[in-house]
Image (cartoon, helix red, strand yellow):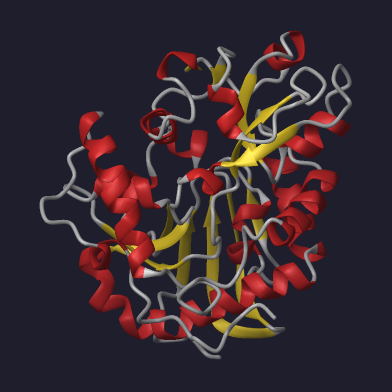
Amino acid sequence: MNLTGVCPSTVVVQQDWEPEAEHAAAYELIGQGYTIDADKKRVSGPLVIDGMDTGVKIEVRSGGGAIGFQSVPSQMYVDQSITLGAVTTDAAISASSTQPVTAVVAPLEKSPQMLMWDPATHPTWTGIADIGKSDVKVVVSSGTVYSTLLSDKGLVKAGQFDTSYDGAPARFVASPDLVQQGYATAEPYVYQHEVPSWNKPVKYQLLSDVGYNVYPEALSVRTADLAKLSPCLKKLVPILQKAQINYLANPGTANKLLVEAVEKFNDSWTYSEGVADYAAKALKDLGIVANDGSGALGGMDQNRVQSALDTLGPILKSSGAKVKDGLKASDLATNQFIDPSITLK
C-alpha cells in the first residue's frame, strides 16, 4: 500500500495522553529506524503495515502535559500539521461549535474507564449500582461528564462525588472504603503488582456497562478538511483498522516501543512492560477492542453516536459547553472510509 502523493509526507497523529496501549493502532504503524523526541514527546518513523513501507512517515504525539493539557480538538486547530487527533465522542460534542472534528475510525469500541473499589471492604458489591445504595465517596477528576450521567440515571448520588482525584494511589490505599475512577487497562494491574502498600486485587465495573456509550479516542480530522483528506483516508483508515488487529495478535513490538518512549520522555508518567502486556490482553478480553455494531472493527454505529449525542449533549450544555445547534451523528463520525471486510475474528 503506497501512500506517497496521496497522504501528507508525514501523517501526524495527536493522542490525548502519554503513550499507552490504548494508542497502539498508531504505534503499531511505526517502523524500524524510528526516532524519539524526548523534549516534544513525539515518536516518528516510517509508516509500515504488514512489513511494507507505505512511503510516508508517521509521527505520534503525546497529549496531556505535552500540549499543556489542552483538549485534542483545540490542539488540532492550533496546529494545522495534525492529520488525525484522538477525540472521544463527548469531547467532539463539546468542541462542535468552534472546533468541529469528525471521527473516521474508532480503534477502541468502548471506553476502558471504570469505577473501582476494594472487594474486601465492600464484599457484597457487584457493580456501580451498589455504590449508589451507600454513602461512600466516589473520587473522580473535576469535570467528568460521566459523574453527571451516573447521578441522572440514579446509579450514584450527586453528593457522593468528590472531584479531587489526582492520579496518585495514596488516598485509596489509606481509605479503602472509597470508590475511585480508573482504567480497566491499567489500575487493576498497577494496584496489585506495582503499589507495594496495596498489592491485592481491586474490583470494578466499566462505565460503558452503565450508559457511558462514547467511542473513546476515535481518530478524527478537522471537519472542514474531510473532503481534502478523503483520498488519503480511503487508504489510511483500512491500514489503521489492520494495525489494531495486528497489535492484538502480537502486541510485543508496539508495547516495547510504548515503554521505551515513556522511559525516554522521563516525566511523571510511568508505564511498565507488565502494564503494557496486561493492557493488551484486557483490551481484547473486555471487548474494549472489538468489532463494532455496524460490522467492522473501527466502525462507528450512527445510532449509537446519536444516542451519545442525545444523552451527553444536554449534560455538556449544562456545564457550559457550546454545542453546535442542530448537531447530528453524521457531523461527529463517518464510516465512509471503513473497510467492512476488516474484522476481528
Residue 74 higher or lower than 340, as above or below: above
Res 77 seen here: no
Q: Residue placed farthest to the top in the image?
A: 174
For the point 70% across and 48% down, the residue is 261
Residue 196 higher or lower than 256, as above or below: above
Left or right: residue 1 compared with residue 172:
left
For the point 35% across and 52% down, the residue is 308
For the C terminus, give its image quadrant.
bottom right
Residue 248 lies, in percent from the top left, at 73, 68
Between 106 and 137, the residue placed more toward the observer is 137
For the point 29% across and 61% down, the residue is 332
Between 289 and 33, the residue placed more toward the observer is 289
Residue 36 lies, in percent from the top left, at 65, 53
For the point 76% across and 37% down, the residue is 188
Residue 328 higher or lower than 296, as above or below: above
Between 8 and 319, the residue placed more toward the observer is 319
For the N terminus, give its image quadrant.
bottom right
